[in-house]
Image (cartoon, rainbow, N blue to C red):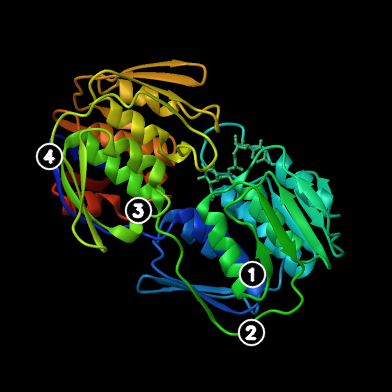
Amino acid sequence: MDKFIVRGGNKLFGKVKIQSAKNSILPLIAGSVIASGKTVIKNTPKIRDVVIMCEIIRFLGGKAEFLGDDLHLDTSLVNSWSLPSNLTSEIRASLFMVGALICRFGYASIKRPGGCRIGERPIDIHVDALKTLGVKVDEGEEIVFSGKIINSGVINLRFPSVGATENAMMTALRGKGVSTIKNCAKEPEIEDLQKYLNMLGANIKGAGTSVITVEGLSKNNSGEIVFTPYPDRIELGTYLFALGAVGGEIEIHAETFKNSQSVINFFKDNACKIHIINDKIYNISISDTLRSFGKVCTGPYPAFPTDLHPQLVACALNANGITAVEENVFESRFAYANELKKFGAKIGVYGKLCLVEKSVLRGANVVAGDLRGGASLLIGALSADGQSEIKNAVHVDRGYYKIEEKFSALGAYVKRVSY
Ligand code: UD1
């Protein structure tokens, strides 16, 4: 097992290269099963969730390998629709494979998928959507989906679930007519999936809005598909909140700012200055102590992302005044707060509301319990006086590739050691 050793207090200076979005890449890997051929996903980080999805592709009979920063997939020989329980229990995104496998084979089976421990994470919205399309679902220890014949129809999601929107899109491709998905999630990563599936020959419209229409896929494009996903807005936000916490000046490619307006806006209104050097480069600096972020409510896109809530809280510990964060997506996302308190953080959690006060932070030994919570502990440690240890680096590795090297390149002291 690995842990991070962090010595706090250093400001951050330098360039940050942002990876392609994890939440685009994972459904794209699943979608590649529909291609029955070759796909290249550009600028793909070798983060743990991606590595596990690649293992699932190999288990099913396909190929997945990295050449430099690009992920090369070949799903022409995929010959199984039964997902391996040892891998699916580790990663919730394995659930995306269900829609792709139904589209290709008419069947899929999976044990209950895993993922971060940030709430109940049921799958009823997925199941209801697939049932509307005519899929028969047998829910035992193993959940078996049978959908040889898919009806086209209208799906009304009870909540705009990202994964259920993506699963419904892929399943509906097996239908003959046009399906409509209402109350869809509008996350930009869904646009990436739409673009990719349309490159395969599908006719999907509406991603990025709350209504998506999907026309049955009659014939696959047979050539190799090269796809560049959106930049990872959560990785970008993590570096911005780290910068907010400790100060300094970082340079980021302008392209990276796509889809990050909600985060940038309230940064711009604070002590942060964004200089546009040219149409390619943005320079972001913190010249003064941050002011409170006021009240921030997480919610489905375009609201503030739940995946940045813990990092925002760690940053707000360095801001004058009180910041309030209301968590509206995952009910149990506050486990990290107890660990932040070990640094001396003044945080109060009241149901789904969290109040954060400027605090004097001292180094401490803490344990990461989930991916984004782990990132917030890193930000806490970077802004604390003295040395900290963050155990369970594996959680952070699910979403950030060699984060210790990226922070070190910016002048922070972050080392990875085994224990
Ligand atoms: C995706 C993201 C994850 C992000 C989340 C919310 C990927 C790979 N992961 O996860 O990083 O935190 O969106 O933006 O894209 N729900 C149900 N029943 C269901 C499905 C979901 O009740 O069948 C609930 C969940 O418990 C949660 C909420 O809906 O409270 C949102 O979940 P959802 O949008 O489905 O998240 P994921 O797709 O799993």
Q: Is residue 118 above or below residue 400?
A: above
Name the residue tied to disc 1: 33
Q: Are marks 3 and 2 in contact (CB under 8 Å)?
A: no
Q: Can I make out residue 60 in this image?
A: yes
Give the residue type that dot 2 points to: Ser
Name the residue tied to disc 2: 222
Circle 1 SS class: helix
Q: Residue at x 60, y 56 (%)?
A: 207
Q: Tell me the CA gap for discs 1 and 4.
A: 45 Å
Task: First in sequence, mark 2 or 4: give its number.
Answer: 4
Say which quarter of the image contains residue 223. bottom right
Q: Residue at x 25, y 49 (%)?
A: 404
Q: Can I make out residue 84 in this image?
A: no
Cβ of mark 1 under 8 A from ligand 1: no
Circle 3 SS class: helix
Name the residue tied to disc 3: 257
Q: Tell me the CA gap for discs 3 and 2.
A: 33 Å
Left or right, residue 326 beside residue 68:
right
Q: Residue at x 28, y 34 (%)?
A: 269
